[in-house]
Amino acid sequence: MWFGARSAAQTSPESSRFMSATLAETSEDSEAPHAPAKQSLRSFLALATASAGVVFGDIGTSPLYAFHHSIAHLRRANGSIAAADVIGVISLMFWTLMAICTVKYVLVLMRFDNRGEGGTLSLTALVQRAGGRGAKAIAIIGMLGAGLFFGDAMLTPAISVLSAVEGLKVIHGLGDGIDRLIVPIALVVLIGLFMFQRRGTAGVGRWFGPICLVWFAVIAVLGLLAMVREPRILLALNPLEGFAIFARHPVLSPAVLGSVFLTVTGAEALYADMGHFGRKPIQAAWLFLIFPCLTLNYLGQGALVLGDNHAAENPFFFLAPSWFQLPLVLLATAATVIASQAVISGAFSLTQQAMQLGFLPRMTLRMTSEEHAGQIYVPQINWILMVGVAALVLGFGSSDALADAYGISVVGAMITSSLLAVVAIHRLKKRPIWQATLIFSPFLILESAFLGANLLKVMHGGYVPLAIAGGLILIMWTWTRGLERLAKAEESDLTMTDIMSMLAARPPMRARGTAVFLTTDPDKVPVSMMHNLKHNQVLHEQVILLTVKVLRRPRVPDAERVKVHDLGPGFKSLVLTFGYMERPNVAHGLSLARAQGLKFDIMRTSFFVSRRTLLPRPAAGLGHLQDLLFVFLMRNAQRAADFFQIPPSRVVELGTQVAF
């Protein structure tokens, strides 16, 4: 479920081109293969254990609702269900897990890493780094995947926590009145989770893996006990039993297939969290723990319904004996909270990546852990998700209703990763495009079938994640197009060679100290420098043209971060390079530059940035409404000085009006 790691800042006020132009870089970033450090057995097991909570939290809680919702389509009027249908649904679920999770993600897609990082945006950056035509189309596919993820990120916490709390209905003695409390209890749990985000998860995160290990062990044992009583459920391991449903129920089978897809919601996390845990720990955890436990539980739920059709009302919780049902509800709630936390953290991480890659405007990023760089908090995204999740819980009211909306965004995201994988095979493995398409065609065909089945949900709530995704895609498209237009509006033909010749002929007054001007191209004259010369008619003794580049690789070592060039008497060019998984830190970059011989006194240094007032021209291209949206995004983007971590007491902002 996650696209960019569940586990990035881009441009703006001082330089609308400040990152959009630097992201064009491809040649500076070589295709050096990722070489993970050797791990001890202890650290390997620790990573595999931790991944049980973060990577597999979403897919691990799917048993709460996936089979229940799938088999509901095949119940007769009297409540009975044919044994062949029960076996067929379980067969479809097992082979869906096998094909999509095990084969596509674990065995194939995880081989395409961007210096160890996975996920849709990482794959987008990897493909763009490889060069070739269609860069804009690749970017659009990446935006589509990111937008669909955010639609999924709102639905997952709502359906997961609601499903867990609904387990209270099966507990004897609570009475019918518990129905009225399901939604309030779920809201309290979810709102509490979002309120906790600003504190970070470092303190409680160490418990995620162990709790989820207990969860997987419990659901496996419950499933195994039910299988012992109904061993004929093992017939579901025959894929022909699943295909037989399409022959017996040609009208109902699309709806069944759309619900069966709920089994693999969260599969993207296997790929997206590769940078946090590494490929091999995730693969080992899936093959030897998660997949076997999920299989045993689904087989157990099927066996239970074979023996008692009435158990189809809530097969997961009826697997447990009555004395264990309340503890199981509490354990399920804890597991769904962890799964929701993983999704929320993934949304923060994906936002960071999207900002760094120039898809979203700057937002406030707060580090919540001094030890773990990947733990960040994005207040704007947190509150948007909280309001969206609360609205979904109140609007739909039950996990059954939410299941009708769930799945469309997930399968859409899977298709985007498959399309990008085809391009990656073509460009990175040097295979002909027809060969690359042929290699991935089984997955594309399977996912297209699931997409067709899930489109039936559009009128039953499926429009919600599509609307969320569409809104975010509109924002990303408007932002990237707006930056392009703004860059053209501010483009200057005046080079630094020209300006230095002019300054030599008519020297301006020189102030003591150093002036730093942000620019995308050190060969061009920065707008802020021209305004300073024009209005103040003064230059500092030393002028540094600062360019921040964001490469299409996750991280850049400090040894490669700084480049200093002498442009002429009193003028220097400083280029700071960051990866898309890093937060640009100009203060840290300057300390590295000083170690390389760049002399300056930070207390006698001023950073000049432009604060723009945008004047849209309706005839110029984006359409009036999109122009207004871009102006709104630009006004609400985080200040450049704050985002790039420039010492605030040293910043000078120069206002300017720009018609774009």
Image (cartoon, rainbow, N blue to C red):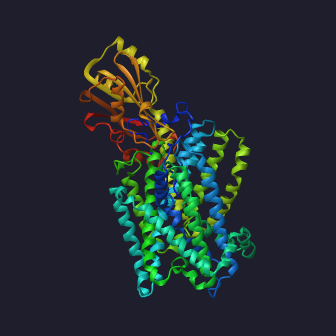
Front residue of 364/339: it is 339
| Residue 497 image point, x, y percent | 43, 17
Residue 195 appears in view:
yes
Residue at the spot 32% in from the left edge and 56% down from the top edge: 199
Please determine whether, in this image, residue 140 is positioned above or below residue 571. Answer: below
Quadrant assignment, res 244: bottom right
Q: Quadrant of the C terminus?
A: top left
Residue at the spot 53% in from the left edge and 56% down from the top edge: 269
Residue at the spot 61% in from the left edge and 50% down from the top edge: 109
Please determine whether, in this image, residue 423 is positioned above or below residue 184. Answer: above
Please determine whether, in this image, residue 450 is positioned above or below residue 353. Answer: below
Front residue of 4/616: it is 4
Quadrant assignment, res 574: top left
Seen as rendered, the residue at the extreme front is: 41
Front residue of 352/631: it is 352
| Residue 309 image point, x, y percent | 61, 84
Q: Is residue 563 left or right of residue 456?
A: left
Please determine whether, in this image, residue 326 is positioned above or below residue 495. Answer: below
Quadrant assignment, res 545: top left
Residue at the spot 51% in from the left edge and 59% down from the top edge: 151
Seen as rendered, the residue at the extreme right is: 247
| Residue 466 image point, x, y percent | 54, 60
Q: Is residue 244 left or right of residue 401?
A: right
Residue 7 appears in view:
no
How many dots with numbers? Answer: 0
